[in-house]
Image: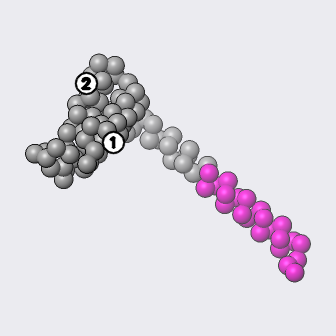
Amino acid sequence: MPDTSYTIAAVLVAAAVTWALRALPFAALTPLRESGTVQYLSTRMPAGVMVILVAYCLHDLPVTETRAAAPLAALAFTIGLHLWRRNALLSILSGTATHVILASTLFAR
């Protein structure tokens, strides 16, 4: 059985490391908040990420086949709803629901 002082030292070291690891992100973010590059990326990245996700999801979709109708219709619905309402959460949830409903009912194999 370890000595009491050894156990206390081990607990204190573990607590110090845990505290430091939790405080480190906040200390690193402080200088980044005023960075022009980070501010630019924070406004441009969401749209870029969505374009990459759409391209990845649709890259192997056979556009000439009937099974492509559900994702394309859901995509058109999502884009239209987002241009109309400008609400990302509403657009994503409604587009997903539209795709699931169309794929499981009208365009089911």
Residue drawn at x 51%, y 47% as measured from the top left: 28
SS state under label 2: helix
Left or right: 1 in relation to 87:
right
Name the amino acid, label 1: Ser
Measured along the vertical axis of the image, is residue 52 above or below residue 77? below
Residue 68, image x, y percentages: 19, 44
The label shown at residue 95 is none
Residue at numbered disc 1: 104
Observer-nearest of 61 and 27? 61
- Check residue 37 for magenta coloring: no
Residue at numbered disc 2: 80
Q: Where does the magenta region start and end? A: 1-22
SS state under label 1: helix
Crowding near pointer 2: few (<14 within 10 Å), some, many (20+)?
Answer: some
Name the amino acid, label 2: Gly
In the orientation shown, which residue stands out farthest toward the bottom? 1
